[in-house]
Image (cartoon, rainbow, N blue to C red):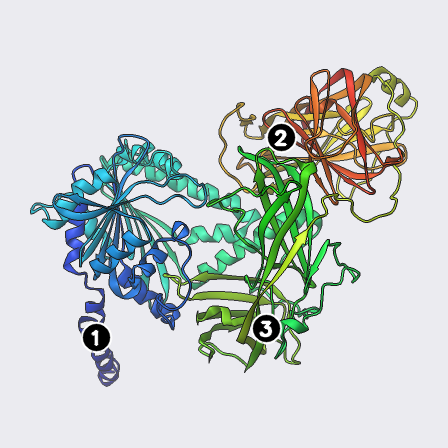
Amino acid sequence: MKKLLVVVLVPLAALAAAGAVAYVLLIGPIFALPVGVTVAESALATDDLILLAGLNVKRMTFLERWFFGRPAISVTNGRPLPEAAVRGIVDHLRAAQVDPRGDIDYAFFALYPSDGPMPHRAAVLVGRFDPAVIKAYVERDLRGTPRSVAGIPSYEVSVTDSATCQPGLVWMLTMESSWILIADPSSHATLVPRLMSPPRDARAELAWWRALSRADVLSVGVWNLHGFESAVPRSPWQGSAAALAAEADVFERVYAGVGVKTVPPKVALRLVMDAAEADRGTQRVKAWEQTVRDSRARWAETMPSVASLYDSLRIRTRGPRTVVDVTINRKLATDSHRVVTEALGAMLSGFGVRVSEPGVAPAAEHIDSDPVTFTASVTPETLPAYDPRAQFAEEVDQIAGPFGLRVDQLRLGGEPGVGLELVVEGFAKAVPNISGHDERARLVIDSVKGTSGQELLRPEACGRERNSQPAAFTRSDARRLEAVKKLRLISGADPRALQSVSGRVQLRLPTRTDVVTLRHPAPGAKVEKHGATFIVTKVQGGSLGYQITGARDRVLDIRALNGKGQPLASSSSFSSEFLFGDGLSGQKNYSGVVDRLEITFATEEKAVELPFVLTDFSFAGKPGEGPLDKTPPFRPYSHEALRRDSSRKPLPSRTMPEPPKAVTLLEPFELSLDKVQPFYALRLDFTLRSPEAPNLQPAFTVGQLRLTRLGLRDGTVILPPAVGAATAATAVRPNWDRAVHFTSAPKDGVLSTSVSFYIDTDARPEDLKSVQGSLTMHFPRAFDTLALEDLTVGRQAERRGLTATVVAKSRKSLTIETNKDGERVYYIRLLGGDGRPVAFIGPNITAAPDGAWRFELSPLGQPARAEVILARDLERKVYPIALTLK
């Protein structure tokens, strides 16, 4: 036995000693923090500091290399930089010739009390820098203004926000060889002297911060909970700040950290809270523990993977300190992926679609019936021209090589200073070597001219979708590419005076390709071609993990094949950038077992531009007559007449796969609550049935169904939010009232429509006991007709204070808006040039908060004018609703 112990323990002891030596000599120096870190901490820790966050860049890049492998290139390779106004922090560093991986050791961010609408904040980068090069970049690209702060050369910088076009905040920058300070002017003036001459006596709370942060890669410490809310005015952090401030009476300080362990790989999330009084902190923690247990129980039935995430959560209390730990290992990461699958299953369950969990069983093999076409050699001259007569091809106004272009829609502008909005579309059948998953084909608009020769395209130097920004052609389905570009015209542009839209299609065509096949790929398999590196990180059944570094756009496609060499259909995919944007890591899931991979590279490419000019603004669509609208004329019809007529023939009972939860008779109508389902919120599905009667079936709105109170079995009452009350963002928009209209033809003398409500609550379907509300039905005593003799965008007609405006027109739709009283719009009759009624699909009705209503119709012909049928002297009948669930 002793010999066995010697044989086992001695090698283990030697291995442990070797590991300790290796850590001291190799790993320890890697993670050792430079002196500049403690200097920056001391400088930032002023007496009014509220929040301090730190990112150990040195350790993070080491861990990234440990887990994913170091990207094959540096951030300074030939990847083009975006314009200065849209650059992120990494792009700014690249432009200033700073390598984040090699030059930065640590990054800090600090928040201070705000004395106005603008926050006081600062960031410090610690590392090795060339101040002369950075100063040159700030002066050249950022138009920085030199300033002197405490005798130290600094710069004042303000960059216009490229998304909102608003002037950006004013920042002050100071660069030294070991640190860079970026801060608002007030904070900057305080911090520069402290960085140049660090205070001798560091703030006492620094010891608290350092003891916690040294073990983590990412650290956030809130030193003053009372002041946090005021430190982040008018920001997305406001909600979190208010939540933290609510705990300030119990906890003095809060720390959150993210750490990573390499063997076995796991991510540790840690929340540390120090209470002012241990007893009060313990009471609050016990309440949290009960909340966690209740929440887990609620999720266990509907989304088990969400419930399993709670298993890794631990809450520990010792004295005044409470620590909440969450450890994410490989299993938990897999469970997190299943959460998405279960959410999809919940969304699709109402349509009879089932979604299986990944990893439970291999996905059934499904072959990609129409894969992207790649050819070894192609030239722009040999690309086939767009064929509008091909199957599924769209009508176009002009053909430019393989692309077809058209003006698709004109609408009134929805922004101040915008007269009209114009939508241009481009189409192409599958173009060889263009996958539609990148921006190798782009639609660019250069000019919109009026009949007088005036330029109507609004100049825009900024904005998320500014006029000058190209629209990429993306793969809309297996057979074609599509691009959509929305344009804003200058104020006062006349829709009847549009002459032309000119632009071009920019095409970077891979003229030569190279396909590399990996048979039976395994993790670690690598392909290096044409400046790009492709690495397999995982292959498991139909799941492929990979990395691409170097010239990433040279990789055109990743195709998985089965054992017969057939391409597998991809069921899902995702990818994410490396920490500093110089590579990506991704995963693709295929329907079947991956036997081999084909990686297609672009070896040569050619850039071409295909100009076009569009002049057709008629939005006429396909020529020819469509079906006629056979809706009979509307006539007054009262509630009493409906009740009298329906009494002769009661509503027949209906057959359903499952009996409804509750039914109420609202003579002569019937309302049933058919289903109650969890769907991010609580979803209630109703069916309203009515006897067939004049006006009801074609009418756009016949009434409104409103819920006013939900009762739960435990006695809890759920009420609608107050008018104007702010609601939290959710996956679905909660609603308590819905307009009612019958969209389908009567069957066996019965009209029927479905109405769904989404209630923002944590209650489960089985918790619901009762539903109260009202059904309001409208019965017109008279009708008016509002004539729109011209369907040009912007044309209006008015009657009795109600104005109807043509706000949008396209090849496939017509949208008319009323300024108020949308419930009075009983119908819209479209008439062709010969005066005959044109049938349509719809309407799609939306009501705006300002009282305006929009009615979008899809004509099945070519309307020339419209008649808006208005209900006058509405008789309203209100039916109280009280449903008790079985």
Q: Nearer the viewer, mark 3 or mark 2?
A: 3
Q: Quadrant of residue 125?
A: bottom left
Q: Amino acid at mark 3?
A: Arg
* Picture coordinates of residue 688, whole percent (x, y): 76, 31
Find residue 22 and name its label. Answer: 1
Is 270 left or right of 187, judged from the image as shown? right
Is 796 left or right of 279, judged from the image as shown? right
Residue found 38% across the figure and 37% down from its top = 235
Whichever of callouts 3 and 1 sits on the residue coming sooner in the sequence is: 1
SS for callout 1? helix
In the picture shown, does residue 492 fall above or below 666?
below
Q: Which residue is mark 2?
A: 769
Q: Quadrant of residue 372?
A: bottom right
Whichever of callouts 3 and 2 sits on the residue coming sooner in the sequence is: 3
Q: Which residue is mark 3?
A: 559
Give the quarter of the figure containing the N terminus: bottom left
**C-alpha gap between disc 2 and disc 1:** 66 Å
Residue found 22% across the figure and 68% down from its top = 30
Is 693 left or right of 818, judged from the image as shown? right
* Picture coordinates of residue 254, whole percent (x, y): 27, 42
Whichever of callouts 2 and 1 sits on the residue coming sooner in the sequence is: 1
Q: Are marks 2 and 1 in contact (CB under 8 Å)?
A: no
Camera-side residue of 872 and 678: 872
